[in-house]
Amino acid sequence: MDLDGTDNARISFTATTDSTILDAVLREKKEFKKLPGASGSAVGTDEAVLQCAGRKVYFAANWSTEYEGVLLDRTRNRQPSYSDVRRATFQNFLDAAAASHNCPQVTISR
């Protein structure tokens, strides 16, 4: 799913069970933060791998440079902060997409 704005501002959201993609994500040198229980792992505010109904599912958000620039301008010295907006946006996507894959509900922490 893509959300397009003006001036090439874009967020793309992905959910996949493709084993090639999952293997590549899990092989990367990233430190995945463990989530409570056996629900999977997550990293940052834009990626998660969850154990869902007997299979792993990868969830991701990709923020264009233009979108990040607009977001930084709009949140500078204001609440919610840039990181709060990113985290909340990914959390909303994760909540909706995870439910459609029979995944446990998880909260991406700060």
Image (tube, grey):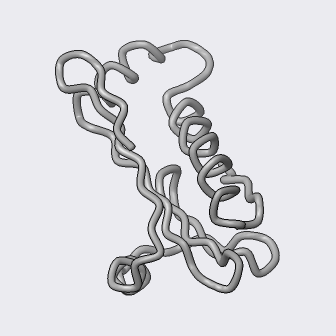
Q: Residue furthest left?
A: 7
103 to 91, vertically: above or below: below
What residue is shown at x 54% (from left), y 44% (from top)? 90
Question: Is 49 on the left or on the right of 106, as rendered?
Answer: left
Residue, far front: 100
Rendered image quadrant of residue 41: bottom right
Q: With respect to residue 103, does 99 lie above or below?
A: above
What percent of the width, then of the height, locates residue 75? 48, 17
Position of residue 81 measured from the top left corner of the image (x, y, whole percent): 56, 25
Q: How many marks?
A: 0
Q: Position of residue 95 (x, y in %)?
A: 67, 49
- The quarter of the image holding the N terminus is top left
Q: What residue do we see at 62% from left, 72% from top?
A: 50
Residue 100, quarter of the rendered image? bottom right
- The residue shown at (23%, 27%) is 66
- Residue beneath the point at 41% across and 74% down: 30
Instruction: Compare residues 51 and 34 and report the one nearer the observer.
Output: 51
Side of 87 relative to 38 (left or right): left
Residue 51 placement, left or right of 74 = right
Residue 107: x %, y % from top left = 73, 53
